[in-house]
Amino acid sequence: MNRQILTGAIHIHTTDSDGTKSHAEVVELARQAGLEYLIFTDHMTLQAKIDGKEKFYGSMPVLIGYEHNDQDDCNHYLVLDSDRVQPSDMTAAEYVTAASIEGALGILAHPDEVRGRDARYRSYPWTDWEVEGFDGLEIWNQMSEWMEHLTFYNQIMMVLSPRKWLKAPTSRILRKWDDLSQTRKVVGIGSVDAHGFLYRAGPLRLTIFPYKVQFKSLRSHLILNESLSDDFSTAKNQIYSAIRDCRVFISNYRWGEAASFQFEIESGNQSALCGGEVRLGSSTVAKISLPLKGKIRLIRSGQLSGETDGISAEFQISQPGVYRVEVYRGRRGWIFSNHIRVLP
Ligand SMILES: [Zn+2]
Ligand SMILES: [Zn+2]
C-alpha cells in the first residue's frame, strides 16, 4: 500500500466573501509555504466552484466548500463536498440536516469561540448542541484562539508575532470532542480561518495573520490510503474520504514539521491508524513516533492514560475506549491526532 500523508489547510476566505486575496493569489502563497492541498470556504457562496476554480493548481488539489451561518451570525458550519448553498433563512438544525441528507461533509466551525476581552469583537460560537448529522468539528481554530487571548494591552505584540500566541486547543472543546466520539466517528480538524484582515491598533493599520504566516501554523495532515491520484475527481474523493474517516492529525508548524508523526495501535495481528479500530487483546499497544522530541500524552476517552518525554513511546493498553495523542513542545501544543477506537 502506498500510503501518503497530505499536508494542507482548511477554512480559507477570499475576496469572494470577507477575505483580502483572490483564489489564485492564496494558492500561490500556500504553494510557497509548502502546502499540498487547500479547502476554501467563503461565506454563503459556491461561486468559485461554479466558475471552475475547483481543480489542480499545478500538482495541488484545491477544493471549494462554503461556510454557512444562521440569522444571528452564529453556528458557523463548513459545508464541504456539496454543490448547493442551503437557504439562508434556515436554522442551524435545518442546514446541518439538509446538508447531511444531500451527502455533504459538515464541520462545526470555531464551535467554542470566546471573545469579548476587546469589546470591538464579538464571538461566533456554536450554540445549538442538540443538532445531529454533522461529521466533525474544528478542535483548533487559529483565529479564535488568537482572539481569545487578545486584550487592549497585548494587542500590538499579538499583531506583530501572531503565531507565538497559539498554545493548544481549549480543554473545553477537547472534552466535547472526546464525549461526542464515544459513540461515533467525529473528525477533529485544525483551521486557519484565513482572511488576511486589517487590524487597527491605535494609529497602526496592520494585516493580522497574513495568509503566508497562517500557512506556516495550523495544518491538517490527511492519511491517504494510496498516493494522491492525478485524476482530479479521484484526488478530491481521497481528500474528503480521509476527513470523513478521521484519518487526520493536526499540527502547529511553528514548533516543527510534523508530517512524519505516527500513531498506531497494534493488537495481535490487527493494527489501526487514526480513524481506525482494533479489538482489545492480551497484548494491545499504542506506538507513537515523532520527528522531534516532545511531551507525548496518550488520552483515553478524555482522560490522561500515559505520558512521557521523548522521540517515541509505547503504551500498553488494557482498557477499551477512544484513544488519541497530544504532543507538546515546551508548553506549546504541537500535534493532536484523531481517535483510534479500541473495542472490548
Ligand atoms: Zn466563521
Ligand atoms: Zn470563516
Image (cartoon, rainbow, N blue to C red):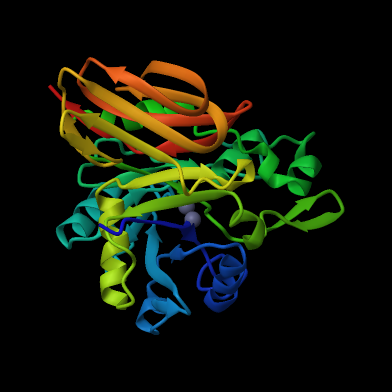
Q: Position of residue 279 (x, y in %)?
A: 14, 28
Q: Please indicate whether residue 304 sits to the left or right of residue 113 in the image.
A: left
Point 62% across, 26% down: residue: 331
Q: Position of residue 343 (x, y in %)?
A: 15, 26
Name the outermost residue toward the front. Answer: 269
Q: Quadrant of residue 47?
A: bottom left
Work out whether residue 137 or residue 299 is closer to the camera in this orientation and state it. Answer: 299
Q: Position of residue 144 (x, y in %)?
A: 55, 42
Work out whether residue 174 or residue 69 is closer to the camera in this orientation and state it. Answer: 174
Q: Please indicate whether residue 101 sits to the left or right of residue 296 in the image.
A: left
Point 57% across, 39% down: residue: 145
Point 49% across, 19% down: residue: 308
Q: Please indicate whether residue 151 sits to the left or right of residue 319 in the image.
A: right
Q: Position of residue 11 (x, y in %)?
A: 46, 57
Name the outermost residue toward the right. Answer: 203
User: Where 222 falls versus 123 (above or below)?
Assistant: below
Please say whether residue 110 is visible from this viewpoint: yes
The N terminus appears in which quarter of the rendering?
bottom left
User: Where 178 falls versus 317 (above or below)?
Assistant: below
The C terminus appears in which quarter of the rendering?
top left
Work out whether residue 318 or residue 60 is closer to the camera in this orientation and state it. Answer: 318
* Labels in figure, total: 0
Please say whether residue 181 is visible from this viewpoint: no
User: Where 97 falls versus 45 (above or below)?
Assistant: above
User: Where 131 falls versus 240 (above or below)?
Assistant: above
Point 15% across, 34% down: residue: 269
